[in-house]
Image (cartoon, rainbow, N blue to C red):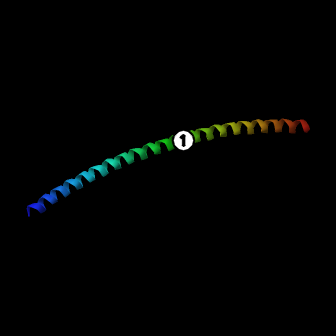
Amino acid sequence: MADKVGASHSSTAGGAAGTAAAAAGSTAAEAAGEAAFNRQLAALTATSTKAAERDVELRVVTTELSTVKKVADERVQ
């Protein structure tokens, strides 16, 4: 019976070590995932900012073209 008790303790210790290693791996994976998420969020923010800048430029050009068209139409009449 003593052999069984010893085996049981080593197996429990091995299981605990395995669980700790898995937890550490899980924490590292979570940190890596969070870093990847933050990089994606930064890329999305940069893309969104560029899109907003282009939208403003497009509105300016559209307004200028509309003004030129109105002036040209008035000259024709």
Residue sitting nearer the eye, 27 or 37: 27
Residue 7 lies left or right of residue 33; in this view the side is left
The residue that mark 1 highlights is 43
Residue sitting nearer the eye, 54 or 8: 8
Q: In x, y percent, where is residue 45?
A: 54, 40
Image quadrant where residue 58 sits: top right
* Residue at the left extreme of this rendering: 2
Q: Circle 1 sits in a helix, a strand or a loop, which is it?
A: helix
Residue sitting nearer the eye, 64 or 18: 18
Image quadrant where residue 71 sits: top right
The residue depicted at 76 percent of the width and 35 percent of the height is 64
Instruction: Give above or below for 61 relative to 18.
Output: above
Tally of marks? 1
* Residue at the front extreme of this rendering: 3
Q: In x, y percent, where is residue 44?
A: 54, 43
The residue depicted at 39 percent of the width and 48 percent of the height is 29
Residue sitting nearer the eye, 35 or 17: 17
Image quadrant where residue 14 sits: bottom left
Residue 65 lies left or right of residue 36; in this view the side is right
The C terminus lies in quadrant: top right
Q: In x, y percent, where is residue 51?
A: 62, 41
The residue depicted at 23 percent of the width and 56 percent of the height is 15
Crowding around mark 1 (Cα neighbors within 10 Å: few <14, some 14 to 19, many 20+) is few
The residue depicted at 89 percent of the width and 35 percent of the height is 75
Q: Amino acid at mark 1?
A: Ala
Q: In x, y percent, where is residue 68?
A: 81, 36
* Residue at the bottom extreme of this rendering: 1
The N terminus lies in quadrant: bottom left
